[in-house]
Image (cartoon, rainbow, N blue to C red):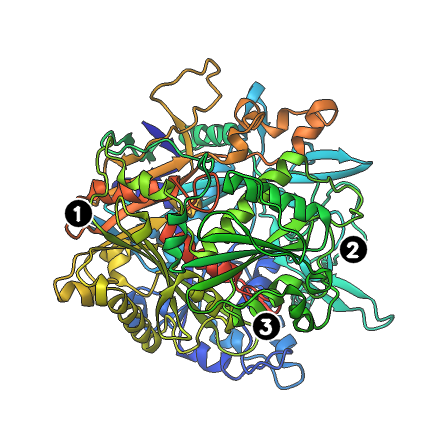
Amino acid sequence: MLITLAYRIPRNLLDEVLGTVTAYPLTEDFEAVWSTLSSEEGQRVPPYSSLTRGIVAATGEPVRMFGESHLAAREVEAGSRRLLLTGRELDHRLRVAVQAWERHIRGEQGPPRLPGVLPEPEAARPYSDFIEPRPGRVPLAPHWVYETAEWQIMRRLAGEPLRIDGDRGLPLRLDTDGALLAWDQGDLIARTHRGLISYGMAKVTARVVTRAGVKDLVLCFDAHLSRLSQCWYGRRTKHAWIDRGEADDPVLRLPVFRASDGNTGDYENRLHPAIATILEACKLKPMTLPPILPAKPGDIRPQFSKTQFHTLGNGLGPRFMLFLHRHVMRLMPMLVPLTYDVDKSIKLPARVEKYQENGLPSAGVSPSGYRRVTLACVYATADARARMLEQLAALAGHPVEPHPDGPPVPVNDALEVIARHCPELLSHDTPNRAAYLGDLSAAPSAGDRLTAVWAETEYHPAAEPPALDAKPHLRRLFGHLGIPVQFLATEPAVLPDGARPRSASEKEHAARAALRDLLRGAGILDDRLPAALTAEHLPNSLTRRTLLAGIHVRRQQNTQGEPVLVLVMTAVDLVPGRLEKCRMLAYSERRGAWVRAAEGIADFNAGTIGSAHLGRTREKVVRTRAEIESRLCALADGDRSGVPIVIFVAASSMRGIWPGLADASLGDGPMPGNVLRARSDDVAVVRLHSTVEEVGRPVNRTEGRQVEDPNQPNAPGQAVYRLAESGAPSWLFPGTSVLFRANGGRRGATTTRFELDDGGYDRRELGKPWHSFTAKEIVVVEPGSWKAEELVTFTARLCEQNISWDDRTALPVPLHLAVTADKDHPDHRASGQAEDDDWA
């Protein structure tokens, strides 16, 4: 049995577990006054979040506001247009804070009006009143339930210290986001490196979710190492924790921003300017962010930006997760752990990591759809050239040594390599790279010939990012020429203080992964993946030609203009035993058709990302579904007509688009492939969910236990587990990372970071990632003509035997291809574009 950090909340114990919430129902009167406001940013109406953050700062309580679309039907019928929710009734500071905030927003435009339309709170409402049980189905609840229900749960878990090795207790403090922090200075994790000390803080989170086919709500926990900044990093410091000095009050977590001091022209980090006004009105001690932080984290702790180099590794390790599971069970014994048992009908072949001894066969080029492919190694340094050629020799099974600017050297009858020294083209400092494209002297892709570029790029995570990164520009330039491109990172000649150069083995691994990514982008496929799917000695093998399609959707919010919806669709036309007949495909918006994968990826990189015409709003979602259906029909046309299709989708990215994929209406509403299904095509749909905070992180497995230490978790094996209490066909596919399985990587299973001394060997260990176990949920929404177990087997093997690197991927190959194409786009998360919350 597999133990995870996911637990059922028995229906009859909802009140005991979730407790109550206090609501301030905001009516049309409040909305009418709000619509008259204008913000200092020049917006017509200020964001509600600026008010709720001010209330959080004044009251020290978690506060959320939800609009009409997130309310229960009876709340809307009663006249509520918004709900202001908090864990307990707020005192007089609520009205004072609202009045002060409005005065700050309005300036001299008139007296505050919002306090006059702010209602009295309702009596504390039990969460169970808003959770509708359904026989054999997941319960229904308004959106605000899932976003706030963890407040009381986390208060309870903070009641006792979390016990780890040696019966050491970690006191936990609630923050205003609903997380628990190991806040005490003695519990900070510290590492000294070259005279500088880096600090991290353990953080525990919880999410109330549904699980397909489970009749009760499910509670998922997780834990993270939040690394702390010891100085401000300008625009890259997004949030800070602030302790107001009251031990029983939550620690504030507030956004910070960079602004000019107005005098010297220097910049400093500040809280929202309304917060100072609110605190003054509430007669509370003002909060200011000091320009220089203390050497050891104190009452103000900025959260470290992911984009910055940090000498302290990430993660807390699986041993800590096991202690967290015990803490949950000790303080909340009424929770019922979900039961996952090994599904013995699903077998995975051994993963093949090495290239074939005799090299990549010519038939491996056929899935690209091209007769001949040229790989262009474009480099600036001798080190990059040597690493490229070393990997190409391993791929070919013989030395590959093209001369700079010389003729092509064959890998096989259909694949050749050229080498080009183009430092100006690759430099981050080159303003006009298009002028140096002639130095490449490689033909654009055309007809049955493809050129794919493997380019060097200078990069190290500790180095300051270049002002003008060459990679996005080169992707776009080559995209216009029909050329897919992949990059090989080489380190700057001089590394920043504290930065560690990569070892020879790390460089070799990075080069091998980059080459395989290049082959993936070109549509080249060796026989490892088809062999894994069609293994005749294992049950549930693939025996017929099948279209394996991936649909990836992501909303990208622009700081200016409408948000856009990114839609990427890729497919593998797999013919068992006939590698030369297989095809890698992608949909090209530019051509309005399914094309060879390399063409589709190049077209995608050449254009702007996403479309404002598509989306999740009421009118846009109809267009989005119609567009996806049109593309699926085009896929199953011509010589592919009548071929069975298995569609892979990610749960998080499809929210709000296909009701039939949601837990609440699983299989009942619209689903991708309905048009094909209506014309009697064979269409299956498999839903993947890899957000471990909502799936439930694996903690331990009880079968085959051989570990003597009772506190050392047993890692998941190469197995797929079925959810026993689910009324829907649902499985969990757990795993471990490459680093965990590497030499010395299991340190996080034998001890916790808190047990290491900052000295000697332990000091080096603190700088490494401590990966915990991972998992993905697999739900068969529509089986088509397949058995559910067959589809889960295909899904697991498509993750286990990847085509672009040596380890398992979070998503099966067709969906992984689509997600990777999106991530590689020049405009993906470009400067000035905000992150989105539905990333697959």
Left of 739 or right of it: where is 795? left
Residue farthest toward the right in the current orientation of the protein: 264
The residue positioned 45% from the left and 44% from the top of the image is 206
Residue 348: x percent and y percent?
32, 33
The disc, 2 or 1, on the residue closer to the chain's N-terminal end is 2
Specify whether 604 is left or right of 576: right
Indicate which disc residue 290 carries: 2
Residue 232 in the image: above or below residue 576: below
Q: Amino acid at mark 2?
A: Pro
* Relative to 322, residue 775 above or below: below
Q: Is residue 126 above or below residue 274?
A: above
Spatial CA span between label 3 and label 1:
62 Å
Kindly identify the residue that appears in the image at 29 percent across and 53 percent down. 581
| Mark 3: secondary structure | helix
Residue placed at 57% from the left, 73% from the top?
559
Q: Give whichever of 4, 163 is nearer the camera.
A: 4
Residue 617 locus on image (x, y percent) = 36, 73
Point out which mark residue 135 bears.
none
Residue under circle 1?
786
Element marked by disc 1: loop
Q: Position of residue 213 (x, y in %)?
A: 23, 46
User: Looking at the image, do the residues carrying marks 2 and 1 touch, with CB atoms under 8 Å apart?
Assistant: no
